[in-house]
Image: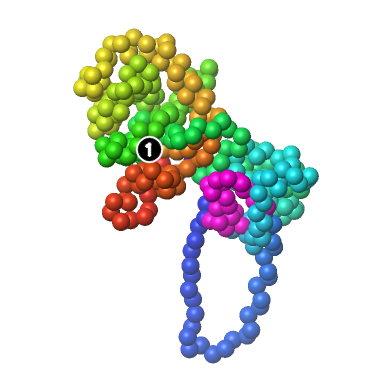
Amino acid sequence: MKKLFAVVLSVAVAGMAFAAPAKKAAKTPAKAKAEFVIVESDVYSAGKEDPQLTAGIAQFLDMTPSVKTVSYKDAAADPKLANLDYSFLPLYLIKKTDAVRSKLEKHLQYGYAQENDDFIILPHQTRTGVYNGKEAKPGVMEIFVMSQCPYGVMAENLVLEGQKAGVPAAKDVRIRYIVDYSDANGFNSLHGSGEWEEDVRQLLIAKYYPAKLWKYLEIRNKDYRSSRWDKAMEDAGINPKKIMKKFDTEGLELLKQEAAYAKEYGVNASPTFLWEGQVQLDFGSASEIEGFGFLNPNAAKGAAAAPAGSC
């Protein structure tokens, strides 16, 4: 998922150790202050402020950040904050001034930011966060993937390893698919038509051969760009003809539903993890949930960091 703001850090060191004192340098003018109000989830840590993001936005604005965090419960009771869109938390607000608005004019113009009388509003800026008000799915981890994305395949393979190791949580995982769809242009997937066609096949396998989906993925993921998906099906005990018979009818309808579901959650990066229907996570934060440590392939090697890549 692309973030609107990126943090770029650079360090420059200069000096003349033995030079004679020169004229006293003029004082650098103090930077203007950017007043942030960040509305956070009352329940999940994933819905809290991301300090790196805050620093990145402040750097983009060339201002010094002043941060106030507010719980969703308190924000909903505040007349100045009550009528905002809290469908995804954290919600970043910046007190509107002429200087702030000028810096963010293009973001407002292109719809990346909104405004009201008091604030510039920056919705859905973080890779992790909470979908406020969505139906809860207790104990369910959904992984949004593109079927030919190497990072999505890595996530699936980690689940397979967890299943083989007998980790109970590894069985409570559902694969969802990221694809764009419109009536005018049909389906569009990042890695081409072969990818969304594979999505369709996997959706049909999940429906008609649910007990064999993970076996298919284990075989298919060894060469996920191969055109021999039919052999992978046969090796997994699946009848390719039965799957392809439903491809152009039921299969395409299933993929349309997936496109709508991913759009509902604003998901466009593979893999993206959705915990219990409400919490959006990345590799690292997903692996920190109790029972899902298998999602960090480096954990067994004693390294804390999980993969950070995505398609």
Instruction: Tell me the magenta residue range.
Output: 37-58
The answer to whether 47 appears left or right of 118 in the picture is: left
Helix, strand or loop at mark 1:
helix
Is residue 120 on the magenta stretch?
Answer: no
212 over 268 or under it: above or below? above
Measuring 36% from the left and 30% from the top, which residue is drawn there?
147
Q: What is the crowding at mark 1: few (fewer than 14 residues within 10 Å), some, or many (at least 20)?
A: some
Q: Is residue 220 visible?
A: no
In the rendered image, residue 105, in percent from the top left (x then y), is placed at 68, 46
Measuring 61% from the left and 34% from the top, which residue is drawn there?
133
> Closest to the observer: 296 or 150?
296
The answer to whether 137 appears left or right of 306 in the picture is: right
Measuring 32% from the left and 47% from the top, which residue is drawn there?
297
36 over 236 or under it: above or below? below
Is residue 38 on the magenta stretch?
Answer: yes
Q: Is residue 159 visible?
A: yes
279 over 234 or under it: above or below? below
Measuring 32% from the left and 14% from the top, which residue is drawn there?
243
In the rendered image, residue 23, in percent from the top left (x then y), is placed at 63, 85
Residue type at mark 1? Ala
* Count of numbered badges drawn on the protein: 1
In the rendered image, residue 113, in percent from the top left (x then y), is placed at 65, 42
In the rendered image, residue 51, in percent from the top left (x then y), is placed at 55, 56
> Closest to the observer: 287 or 108?
287
State which quadrant residue 226 falls in.
top left
State which quadrant residue 215 falls in.
top left
The answer to whether 136 appears left or right of 79 in the picture is: left
Q: Which residue is mark 1?
A: 169
Q: Quadrant of the C terminus?
A: top left
